[in-house]
Image (spheres, rainbow, N blue to C red):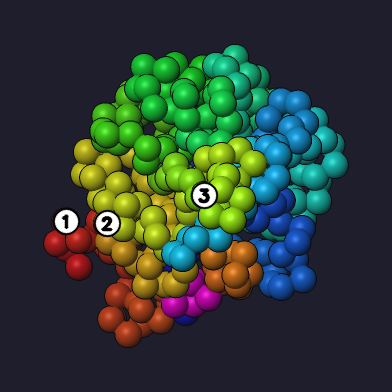
Amino acid sequence: MIDLSIEIAGIKLKNPVMVASGTFGFGREYTPFFDLDKLGALVTKGLTLKPCPGNPPPRVWETPAGMLNAVGLQNPGVDVFLREILPFMKTFGVPIIANIAGFNVKEFATLASRLSVPGIAGIEVNISCPNVKTGGMALGTLPELAAEVVGAVVEATSLPVIVKLTPNVTDIVGLASAVAKAGAHALSLINTLQGMVIDINTRRPALGNITGGLSGPAIRPVAVRAVWQVAQGVDLPIIGMGGICTANDALEFILAGASAVAVGSANFRDPLTAVKIVRGLEQYCIQNGIEDWQELIGAAWKGNA
Ligand SMILES: Cc1cc2nc3c(=O)[nH]c(=O)nc-3n(C[C@H](O)[C@H](O)[C@H](O)COP(=O)(O)O)c2cc1C
């Protein structure tokens, strides 16, 4: 039995494989498929202060190598989450990371404070959603504003603060450094890439929101590059995501410098993807005689494995 456990910013994970925000709901739909305690951690759908209806349909569009979505943070709001959803999620026996999305700095801080309750292991700050007009990427692309949000969140909670970065910037290392200085304990990267599709039959944009976020295998090389650059430039643990479908994909992220990975869009195609990846990582360690899997973190540039 290989020990795949790791601690990230004080959160103890039995393995480094999580599920990415917005692609696993609050877990309920996946319970018929596997025992969720097999996951390293579970990241909630993005939570807003008030219930959010999301964007007009169509909100999802398939492209040849990935999907375009503009769900627009549809969720029941933090009150309903705390009252009706968290008690159920706590029964999974897996660390729960609450993903938050405010529309201004104060909302982010209020959300972090409200969610600082037993049962929540950490806060993931989504300053990178490309599908909302204010908040989201508007805050996440400017280092000074991103740092302001993160500073306010760190002040508002004693939980570990994980900051989720957008790839839709020219200098992701600069952005990561700014949020690190503001007190972030870990980083998640990447969120979706901005994209759009035009329906040639209607001759109109395919998505109700016109633009959306591209996810899936198409963005994997962009995500691996982002992890590679940030891991070498900023001294914080990284949760890598973007197009991960197999254990080999996950290993690329780990070798680039990620201490954990998250499975996103692949959950829609095969709900068992994350557990298959855990098994695949174990097999890789056995086949390659690796006793301490953490030696693989960043090995592509550290050259130590
Ligand atoms: C339908 C959908 C909804 C998403 N909702 C959120 C969200 O609420 N908060 C967030 O931080 N990221 C959200 N994301 C981004 C994912 O968590 C992930 O960062 C991104 O999809 C890249 O991973 P993937 O290529 O494996 O899907 C969403 C992605 C998809 C596809």
Q: Which residue is mark 3?
A: 198
The relative height of residue 248 versus residue 256 in the rendered view (above or below) is below
Crowd tier of the residue under label 3, counting other residues whose Cα lies within 10 Å: few below 14, some 14–19, many 20 or above: few
- Disc 1 marks a residue whose amino acid type is Trp
Classify residue 93 by image quadrant: bottom right
Where does the magenta region start and end? 276-280
- Can I make out residue 263 in this image? no
The relative height of residue 236 versus residue 298 in the rendered view (above or below) is above
Residue 33: percent from left, percent from top: 71, 73
Q: Which residue is mark 1?
A: 301
Indicate the quadrant containing the C terminus: top left, top right, bottom left or bottom right: bottom left
- Disc 2 marks a residue whose amino acid type is Ala
Q: Which residue is mark 2?
A: 256
Magenta-highlighted stretch: main secondary structure? helix
**Mark pair 1, 3: CA separation:** 40 Å
Sooner in the amino-acid sequence: mark 2 or mark 3: 3
